[in-house]
Amino acid sequence: MKQTKRNSKSLILKYIIKIFFVVNTFSVTSISWAKIKDILPTGLQIGFDVPRPLYYRWKEKTGWQYEVNGSIDFKQVLLEGDYGWGSILRKNPSGKRTSLAENIGQYFRIGLSYNFIKNSPDHNAAYLGMRYSKAYFKDYLYGKLAREKNEKGKEITPFWEDDSLADIDQQAKLQAHWFEIIGGVRVKVWGWIYAGCTARYKFAKKITIRTQNPFDIIGWGMNDEDAFGANFYIGIRIPLQAISSKQSTEEIATPSK
Amino acid sequence: MRFLKINYTHYYLFTAISLVLLLNFNGCRDLQDCRSIYTNEVWIEFKGETKLEINKLKYHKPANKHSAYKKDKPGNEILNNLKDEKLRIYLHPKNNIVSLLFYKAPVDPTAPKPAPDTLTIFYKRIFSLLSPYCGLQEEYIIGKVETTFAGNKIIKPALRNKKYETDQEEFKKPNIEIYY
């Protein structure tokens, strides 16, 4: 009898331990899953800068430029990347000294942003971030050297006769990289369609191989010490965590006690 | 009801930022200003314990660059450019080398003339568009200096117009120092 009682006790203990392990395992898994959900992306956005080609082609009259934008939302953090391509042509107005500079190439930007709008049911975003950018381009240069001018704007007779007036015709494959501080807003327009705008301050530019100095750099703009830029884009945002977004909507709708 | 819950602040923010960005950021450079920040004028300063006695100074044709030097410029004497141990010379816009000959005043007029001292400047030229209205410009960067004087030091390799030297200390420095 004693033996049977001992056996049944040990059996019960075994079951209790098993149940404890199962419950524990389930609870651990559920915590991990919640944590994993927090880490997983909530949405993917792909956009196109619509006014960019029109602005550079018809207003600036420097050629076509295009840019696409991609973004993955991780709760408050956005992993963003841009890719752009096109050309920037500068040509002398009629009646002026012959000169032409063209910059043709492509660039990309990659970086992180922090979204300051929390739990927006529409997944609107107001963000600040940093970007690393790199451009690969060909730079063409053609024309005559400008006559040096004095402080009053009068031409100085060159010391070396008219050698300086010979035509220059050269091209070079160059690279440039720089950093950007960006700020922007993204708002829902309708359904999955979103509109956004980003302002950029570009700085710390370096031209890696320097055989000629480009007037413009694709993705950067006019080759100055620093530059500002802006993008307006329209795109679609594909939700990757539909349930969690619903939950957050409900959280917003129900005020906390 | 769902419509009423939209947070319009985001949309106001979007509109405000869009309007600000519509202002043109590109209009900062005056494209009709044809004054270049670059120059081909080099400032050389001679440093020695005694006064530098030179009675003839001229450009010298480098052996392999005959065709690029036009007319009589290379033979021209530029002694007037040498004042108070300071010399201003011009780099050639189509070469990467400029040479000078310095003829010292003989101590004994009857003795045979000593060989002149030489100064050769090797430099890099970088082209760029000054502006579509003005044409192209050249930037000069001194790479190496060779001389028969006692020594030399490149202080400011990039040649800039004086009026664009913002730093007063930099403004006072020559491009090259020659020790004799």
Image (tube, rainbow, N blue to C red):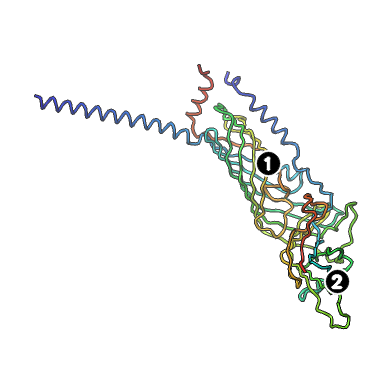
Label 1: few (<14), some (14–19) or many (≥20) C-alpha neighbours in 10 Å: some
The x and y percentages for residue A119 are 54, 27
Residue depicted at x 37% and y 31%: A28
Label 1 secondary element: strand
Q: Residue A96 location in percent, x, y?
A: 86, 54
Against A11, residue A164 (above or below) is: below
Which residue lies at the image location 71% right of the left edge and 36% below the top edge? Answer: B21
To the question of a shared chain for discs 1 and 2, the answer is no
| Residue A226 horizontal side relative to residue A10, left or right | right
Mark carried by residue A201: 1
Horizontally, residue A230 falls left or right of residue B65, namely left
Specify the subunit that label 2 lies on: B
Question: Measured from the top left, where is residue A190 in percent x and y?
Answer: 60, 29
Q: Cα distance, mark 1 to mark 2?
A: 54 Å
Element marked by disc 2: strand
Q: Residue furthest top?
A: A257
Chain bearing tag 1 is: A
Q: Residues within 10 Å of mark 2 (few under 14, many from 20)?
A: some
In the image, residue A148 lies at what x, y percent? 85, 57
User: Do the residues bearing badges 1 and 2 touch, measured as CB atoms within 8 Å?
Assistant: no
Q: Which residue is mark 2?
A: B54
Quadrant occupied by the C terminus of chain B: bottom right
Type of the residue with mark 1:
Tyr
Callout 2 amino acid: Ile
Mark number, residue A125: none
Considering the image in quadrants, where does the N terminus of chain B appear? top right
From the viewer's side, name the closer residue of A134 and A121: A134
Q: Residue at x 48, y 29 (%)?
A: A244
Q: Is residue B70 above or below residue A204?
A: below
- Residue at the left extreme of this rendering: A1
Q: Nearer the viewer, residue B166 or A24?
A: B166
